[in-house]
Image (cartoon, coloured by chain):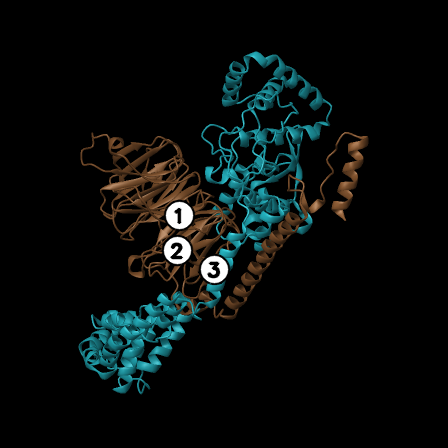
Chain colours: A brown, B cyan
Amino acid sequence: KTSFNCIFNVSFSLRFKPFRRRPLPAQRKYMRSPLTPEMATQEVQLNETLAHLKTESETLKSKLEEERAKLHDVELHQVAEKVEGLGQFVMKTRRTLKGHGNKVLCMDWCKDKRRIVSSSQDGKVIVWDAFTTNKEHAVTMPCTWVMACAYAPSGCAVACGGLDNKCSVYPLSLDKNENLAAKKKSVAMHTNYLSACSFTNSDMQILTSSGDGTCALWDVESGQLLQSFHGHAADVLCLDLAPSETGNTFVSGGCDKKANVWDMRSGQCIQSFETHESDINSVRYYPSGDAFASGSDDATCRLYDLRADREVAIYSKESIIFGVSSVDFSLSGRLLFGGYNDYTINVWDVLKGTRVSILFGHENRVSTLRVSPDGTAFCTGSWDHTLRIWA
Amino acid sequence: MAEGSKDQASTGTTDPEEDSPNMIVYRKIEDIVTRIQDEKAGGVAIRTVKSFLSKIPSVVSGADIVQWLMKNLSIEDPAEAIHLGSLVAAHGYIFPISDHVLTLKDDGTLYRFQSPYFWPSNCWEPENTDYAIYLCKRTMQNKARLELADYEAENLARLQRAFARKWEFIFMQAEAQVKIDRKKDKAERKILDSQERAFWDVHRPVPGCVNTTEMDIRKCRRERNPHRVKKSVYGVPDDGQSQPSPIHISSQPTRKPTKEDVQKEITFLNTQLDRHCMKVSKVADSLMTYTEHRDPSQQRVKKWGFSLEEALKDPTGRDQFLKFLESEFSSENLRFWLAVQDLKRRPLQDVPSRAQEIWQEFLAEGAPSSINLDSHSYERTSQNLKDPGRYSYEDAQEHIFKLMKSDSYARFLRSNIYQDLLLARKKGKSLTGKRLTGLMQSS
């Protein structure tokens, strides 16, 4: 019917008016050229298939939620009722590290439990002795917003990156006069900002996450890409490697509100959790490796159990309305420390789900938080240009 | 809520900016601020306060705000309420009427609420031309209380240098604003002036104060239309010279899912459904074995062998030791020790009666669970009980502890009860170990 009309109108217009393109029927607005009947049917079929697939996907998601709900047994905090409560403990700032010229964005501890590397919006990466507060090394990156930094397990190098879309490794020399920038090695290349990086259990490999929506595993020596991890639908903001005894996996969190667990060897996503209501800024494994915690812009921290394959606890309060930027566990896993965008640190009893303590001190957002390797202290970095050691 | 946001990539009906992290916080603050102002629903009373020769309209005291926050947001510590209130102020939703520094004080300091027109959620990014017009306007209003602060005077001087060529235009705009302001009602003007000042305190904060409009660069790309024309506070048309913000780099639009993407997702979801999902979460399971005295690990059982203190620290260890003592009909020692431990944790008012009960059960003449105390400790304890306190039994407890340590504890470690646990765990663990790794491999 349509084709008949077209021919009819075209012949009319050729005779009486200059040719005027007929507006296309509504459902084919995206097509730029006039359709043949065959193409029209094909296009409609493809659209139906995509819509059909989406429906199937949504149905499966609901089914999965149903199954998870069926297996839902008693809540973690109910089991924890029998556990002794934690006593009052006072944590204070024991050291303040001053020296960055702008917001501190990231920090990491050295395995020697004493040294710290931190990176800032001003492009500087500084290595500190946390005990004496002395600066041991300083590097100026060619870009601002150095959002990620990590200490190598050997303590002999640091990795960092940010708006330059790269992750670079700097070997640390004992000679403080030596120009560190000269020995810089570019390892990772992403197509958007580097959000997080971490050495695996050796100095030889680095795991990175990026605003380009992917994570990647790199060989440090050659700069070769060993494995890439696709699955997030938006920027990946954080990652954490599983404790070495529990195998080759890591967890990542992103702006798509998802936390994904990956197999490092195959590159496959083996588990996915989507219960947060906004960006996940930080993920950290529970010390036993059986679970992980996440912190999000929805002002909550959550605990996900890997065996039960679901969220098992939410740490939130009516009075906490600002997002969580960074989380870490105490050595035993009984406590969860959260750095928040309201300048505070909230300490949670992981098992009972209650808040144990709130710590004030920073004068702007807390952007990063890590517990020391021996669990005796934790360090926070903030937009107020300082780092603080708490114990 | 999760469903809605999943759809938005395809339908595009939800405003993506509502999802942005900043907006989430703003909406929460706005909810709080709206509730505080709703007097009928338990909000604070907003009044006009008489001061010297004039009246101060539409104000609330800081103390009232702190009280409201504590009551309505379940905050126990006033310091926390003050901190939260200060953040609400720092973001520009409430402000002190006589200070540029936006913090909340828990006293009679007077505060006013910001007009929704100036709320940060309206995505204001005021240009320096607007700020120049504002400062210029302020100098034209010849009133002592509206005098520029030092930092404002410095800012004005700097802007005059920067906008030297278009200063005439700015001056004219300022004059126009003054004319408009003069037409308004006096009381209304007081309120509007203060709100306008608070707006600039947020966007051009006092040196040393936190600039709450700073954004995390990772979240900036979210904005749909970074190149939209920014609205001017004073209606100054955009002369095309305003630079688009450097942080709004031309980003790839949020990827629409392709057929392959959805197919991958379906495969993944099917795998998830087929997985063996254990019923109990591992964390909860570990917790239950610890508290319900089930299946202690070999490591734990070994620990009980280190010292009596270690064994008693662990609730399962305590349980097993008690079981052993019961088999020897000598459990009264441990039960006494546990009762005294419990006494130390009781609330003060319960202590005297509980202490008496312990005496009756374990130490009195003809007590049902009579323990064996030397005469010296016995005398001391009965003296203590004339004025019973938490530590009345310290002496006796120490004595009984030493007795258990030197006598029963050693026999416990050699007992079947303990040895069975220690050895049985060895066999048990490898079996469980194999099962667990098997599960992990299959998933």
Q: Which amino acid type is marked by label 3? A: Phe
Nearest the eye: B370 or B139? B139
Q: Determine the image quadrant of residue B113.
A: top right
Give coordinates of residue B216: x percent, y percent: 47, 38
Please indicate whether residue B349 sits to the left or right of residue B22 in the image. Answer: left
Nearest the eye: A207 or B303? A207
Nearest the eye: B65 or B389? B65
In front of the other: label 3 or label 1? 3
Give coordinates of residue B384: x percent, y percent: 30, 71
Residue B160 lies, with reference to residue A303, above or below; the image says above
| Discs 2, 1 touching: Cβ within 8 Å | yes
Residue A262 lies, with reference to residue B136, above or below; the image says below
**Dot 3 surroundings within 10 Å: few (below 14), some, or many (20 or more)?**
some
Give coordinates of residue B364: x percent, y percent: 31, 83
Q: Chain of mark 1?
A: A
Q: Which residue is mark 2?
A: A262
